[in-house]
Image (cartoon, helix red, strand yellow):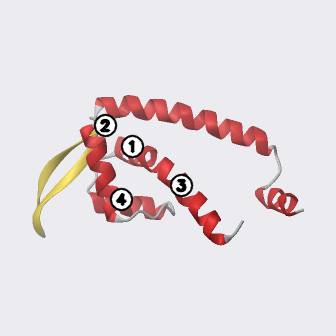
Amino acid sequence: MNETGINNIKAQMRKGMLEYCILLLLSERRAYPSDIIGSLSDADMIVVEGTLYTLLNRMRKEDKLAYEWEESKKGPPRKYYHITPFGRKVLQEMSAAWDEINNTVKHLRGSEPTVKLLENNKK
C-alpha cells in the first residue's frame, strides 16, 4: 500500500475517534475550542478548527454538549463547551464499545510487538 493509502486509513481512524476523544476531554472539564485543539494536539491528534467547530455544533444539536459564554479579559466573550448528562451516557456507551474493540484487536494481535507484525506482513 502506498503512503497516500496509509494516510487515508489513518485519517479515517482518527475521524472515527474524534467525537469520543472530545467527550473524554469534556468529561473532565469545560473547555474553549482552542483548548480542545491543544489537548488533542498534545495527544498527537491533529484537528483543524473547521473540523472541530463543525463537530462541536453537531454534538450540541444532538444534546451531547452545551456551552456557556464567558467574558474574556483579552477580547470578546468566549464560548466554553461542557458535556451534558446525555453526553455522559453516550460517553459510557462509547467507552464500552472502545473497550470491546480494543480487546478484539489485542486478541488478534496476540502478544507480538507491532514491529514484528509489520515484518511478518511484508513477507
Q: Quick check: 111 left or right of 48?
A: right
Residue type at mark 3 is Gln
Distance of label 3 from label 1 (alpha carbons): 18 Å
Q: Which residue lies under the disc numbered 2?
A: 64
Q: Are marks 2 and 1 in contact (CB under 8 Å)?
A: yes
What x and y, as percent, mark residue 1? 72, 65
Which residue extends farthest right? Answer: 123
Asked if 25 appears above or below 71 in the picture, the reply is above
Q: Which residue lies under the disc numbered 3?
A: 12
Question: At 13% from the left edge and 70% from the top edge, which residue is drawn?
Answer: 74
Decide which of 45, 26 is in the foreground and name it.
45
Local packing at callout 3 (Cα closer than 10 Å; few below 14, some 14-19, many 20+) is few
Q: Which residue lies under the disc numbered 4?
A: 51
Distance of label 2 from label 3 (alpha carbons): 22 Å
In the structure shown, which secondary structural element does the residue marked by tag 1 occupy?
A: helix
Residue type at mark 4 is Thr
Q: Which residue lies under the disc numbered 1?
A: 23
Dot label at residue 120: none
Q: Quick check: 74 left or right of 109?
A: left
Local packing at callout 1 (Cα closer than 10 Å; few below 14, some 14-19, many 20+) is many
Question: At 34% from the left edge and 45% from the top edge, which residue is drawn?
Answer: 26
Distance of label 4 from label 3 (alpha carbons): 13 Å
In the structure shown, which secondary structural element does the residue marked by tag 3 occupy?
A: helix
Of label 3 and label 1, which has the lower sequence position? 3
